[in-house]
Amino acid sequence: MKVIKKNAKAQLPPNAATIGFFDGVHLGHRHIIGQVKHLAQERGLQTLIVTFTEHPRKVLNCDYQPTPLNTFSEKMALLGQCGVDYCCPLEFDKELAQTSSYNFMRDFLKNRLNVQLLVVGYDNHFGSDRNATFQDYVRYGRQLGIEVVQAEEYPLADQRVSSSAIRFCIQTGDVATAAQLLGYPYSITGKVVKGHQLGAKMGFPTANIDLRNVHKILPRDASYAVRVLHHDQAYAGMAYIGRRPTVSAEGERTLEIHLLHFDGNLYGHTISVQFIQQLRPERRFHSLSELEQALRHDLEETERIVTP
């Protein structure tokens, strides 16, 4: 996938495109991208994704500004796995926010990017005229020489696939359902820092990630069965997110991971933690021995749930 800058002067070959923020690059997004690829192949076109570096709501100062499911680099990597030819990430600034859908289609999609076919998400809108409908896009397309097609919704029984639904699953600790909707396990990547060493004293040494450097949505405070990726190796693990209420009254929120069948020093290394299933919600234990007993049960459950 070749990344195209907004002001690139080189004319792209005729292409089929779609537009969106693509937070999570979930199954619904991949379904739309699949339709773009299919239509492009039928018409002998290249494929293009137009996306944004920041969520448009941040610029529009909406009351609801969602915490992203991916960092920008993670999103671009996931889009790169979708098998498209080009991606144009735009900075959603005030100028772009004030551009009407017709002007955006004319000046940017047609004149700059040579879009011949535009696939519009079934619930997607673009341009400053938020009341513009799909039929308006079709009419503008006829005037500009852009074929406009409405994407089909991803068919998943009893569950709508959307970024907001996935955020809700993660915030409530239902990481298993989040993985079903994403098409991959939700993950957090970070550098391992020195922790409080309490886990090691109980026989459960942990790799700790500083959450102040994690700029994406975090799962609910709880214990989880996870898969840990490090240097192209995968390990089963159990993770805890929370404020350690058993040992600290007002502790900082932390992410602590115990890797199963691992013997090594991870300090300073970057690891990725894939959340597979919640084991139990956070709670305050009456003693460290009670906490240790819970950890041993978590270990047994993780052995059963996670395969490296």
Image (cartoon, rainbow, N blue to C red):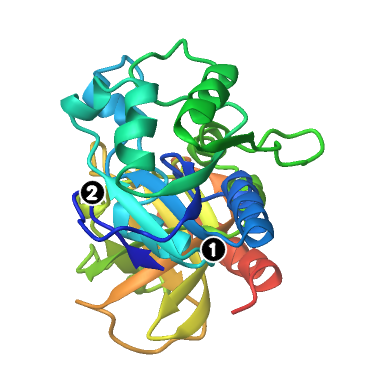
The answer to whether residue 248 is left or right of residue 109 is left
- C-alpha separation, residue under disc 2 versus residue under disc 1: 21 Å
Between 164 and 289, the one nearer to me in the picture: 164
Residue plotted at (70% across, 36% down): 153
Residue 82: mark in rendering: 1
Rendered view: 58 above or below 296: above
Quarter of the image holding residue 53?
top left
Residue 141: mark in rendering: none
Rendered view: 171 above or below 218: above
| Number of callouts | 2
Q: Secondary structure at mark 2?
A: loop
- Indicate which label's residue lies in the foreground, 2 or 1: 2
Residue plotted at (69% across, 33% down): 160
Between 209 and 138, the one nearer to me in the picture: 138
- Residue on which the image places disc 2: 6
Residue 219 in the image, given as x and y percentages of width and height: 45, 44
Residue 238 in the image, given as x and y percentages of width and height: 50, 65
Rendered view: 83 above or below 277: below
- Amino acid at dot 2: Lys
Between 87 and 190, the one nearer to me in the picture: 87
- Amino acid at dot 1: Cys
Residue plotted at (46% across, 72% down): 228
One can see residue 125 in this view: yes
Residue 281 in the image, given as x and y percentages of width and height: 54, 42
The answer to whether residue 91 is left or right of residue 263 is left
One can see residue 71 in this view: no
**Residue positioned most to the bottom:** 263
The answer to whether residue 63 is left or right of residue 186 is left
The answer to whether residue 236 is left or right of residue 68 is right
User: The N terminus appears in which quarter of the rendering?
Assistant: bottom left
Local crowd size for mark 2, using a 10 Å CA cut-off: few (<14), some (14–19), many (≥20): some
